[in-house]
Image: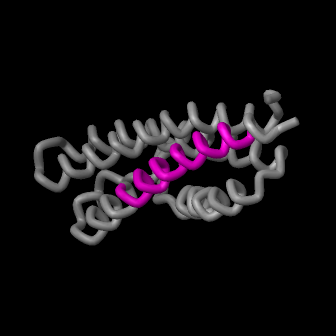
Amino acid sequence: MAFTFAAFCYLLALIAVGFCIFFAIYTVICVDELRTDYKNPIEQCRNLNQLILPEYIIHGTFTVLFIFSWQLISILANLPLAFYHIYTYAKRPVMSGPGIYDPTTILNRSTLSSTLRISWIKLAFYLVSFFYYLYAMIYTLVTSN
């Protein structure tokens, strides 16, 4: 049982996905509060936009680590979400700061429902990824020479 670079990547990915799960849960809660008109959209979008770049950087970091350690299943699982993050950030509305949520359009029914759906999908992806990374880390530790 040896601690390889792949096991190290999976360990870092476990910790990073824990943060991404928190970000996804927070996004779901904030968007749901917007849907029920409990919060001000300007404040909520400001709070949500502060989490966009950290989430994208965290996800990009462990995706690059998987590329360096050549973990094909993890690479193939993470690349679509990484490309989606790049696409959404490239197509973001013109704002003064970083982020993808615009307070003037977030309350549109279609925008709000798609944002909520995407948040739930990201949460499910991160939860499945967490358990897969846990399994893969243990498997890598047990089978390495």
Q: Main secondary structure of the magenta part?
A: helix
Q: Position of residue 53 (x, y in %)?
A: 55, 41
Residue closest to the eye, 134 or 125: 134
Q: Nearer the viewer, residue 141 or 15?
A: 141
Q: Give the position of the C terminus as an image quadrant.
A: top right
Closer to the camera, 110 or 68?
Answer: 68
Q: How is the image coloured?
A: one colour
Q: Which residue is depicted at the point 66% across and 45% down?
A: 136
Q: Is residue 127 magenta?
A: yes
Q: Is residue 47 magenta?
A: no
Residue sitting at 23 percent across and 59 percent down? 107
- Residue found at the very far right of the displayed protein: 145
In the image, taking residue 29 as reference, residue 22 lies left or right, namely right
Residue 18 percent coordinates (x, y): 49, 35
Write down the region rendered in magenta.
Answer: 120-140
Relative vertical location of residue 118 with respect to residue 1 in this rendering, above or below: below
Instruction: Say left or right for 54 vs 115.
Output: right
Q: Is residue 1 left or right of residue 127?
A: right
Nearest the viewer among 38 and 8 is: 8
Q: Position of residue 10 (x, y in %)?
A: 68, 38
Q: Residue at x 29, y 58 (%)?
A: 106
